[in-house]
Image (cartoon, rainbow, N blue to C red):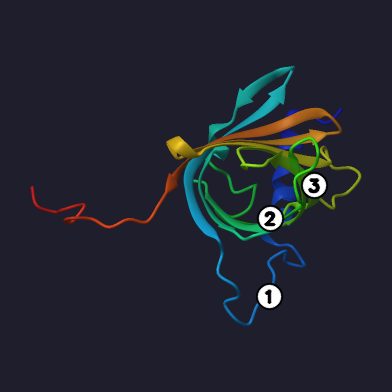
Amino acid sequence: MTPPGLKWLWLCCLLVAGCGTARTSALPMEATPGPAPVLTLVWVGRGEAERLEDGAWKRVPEFDYDFTVEQRRYAHHWESVKSLRRRHPDYDGSAGPREQTMFFRLEYTAPGEDGRVASTIRSSLGEGTGHTDVEFRRAVLVMRPDLSRFAPFDRYRITQTYAYERGALKETVMLLDGETPWVRNKEKAALFAPHTFSAAPTSAAR
């Protein structure tokens, strides 16, 4: 059995390999701007890291992060760019740079008889599949990274809940070995929407 500290180091090395220094980028190459999306959303939030030790989830705040997601929704697919920043002073750099960027492309099918919409995924975290409802409120995404057989996990599972009316998004990013959880990040984000101001929103005047 791999000691928790060694497993955490494994995670750090693998995340760097999967997110920051991929040999072939999942980001599609385009010489022109491409078609305009149906909708662009920007989510701003924070992720809190936990790992499973002796059957209980233990907080590891030095691996917490702030993040933004730039989400472009097209008629039949979404493209998202996620940027995260680790600001904790005790972060030791073992998960790579404090700043990282990931890309996700989800291709959607027509709704099935069960009312679910299936998706295929290509991302910086690996390829996978997912499903959601017709209004894209609750989604489950599963990605399988190309890792060594000695790695302590073999998949990512992301569950998402969009509360559009409140401008809120909740995500749980889970790392699993089969169905056995190992690490999870709990994320909460708020919707940022462009708008105009009737006056300067901030001022240096006291």
Crowd class of label 2 (few under 14; some 14 to 19; many from 20; radius 10 Å): some
Residue bearing the label numbered 1 = 29
Q: Amino acid at mark 2?
A: Cys
Q: Are marks 3 and 1 in contact (CB under 8 Å)?
A: no
Q: Nearer the viewer, residue 173 or 61?
A: 173
Q: Position of residue 88 (x, y in %)?
A: 48, 41
Dot 3 lies on which element? strand
Residue at 27%, 57% (x, y): give it: 196
Q: Amino acid at mark 3?
A: Thr
Q: Are marks 2 and 1 in contact (CB under 8 Å)?
A: no
Residue bearing the label numbered 2 = 19
Q: Position of residue 113 (x, y in %)?
A: 81, 38
Q: Amino acid at mark 1?
A: Met
* Residue, far left: 206
Residue bearing the label numbered 3 = 129
Q: Earlier in the sequence, mark 2 or mark 1?
A: 2
Q: Earlier in the sequence, mark 3 or mark 1?
A: 1
Dot 2 lies on which element? helix
Q: Earlier in the sequence, mark 3 or mark 2?
A: 2
Which image quadrant for residue 50? top right
Q: Position of residue 107 (x, y in %)?
A: 74, 56
Residue 142 visible from this viewpoint:
no
Q: Position of residue 178 (x, y in %)?
A: 86, 33
Q: How many numbered dots are placed on residues in this image?
A: 3
- Of badges 2 and 1, nearer the viewer stands 1
Residue at 56%, 64% (x, y): give it: 37
Q: Nearer the viewer, residue 202 or 58?
A: 202
Dot 1 lies on which element? loop
Residue at 9%, 52% (x, y): give it: 205
| Quadrant in which the N terminus is drawn | top right
Q: Is residue 68 left or right of residue 133?
A: left
Seen in the picture, residue 78 relative to 139 is either above or below; the reply is below
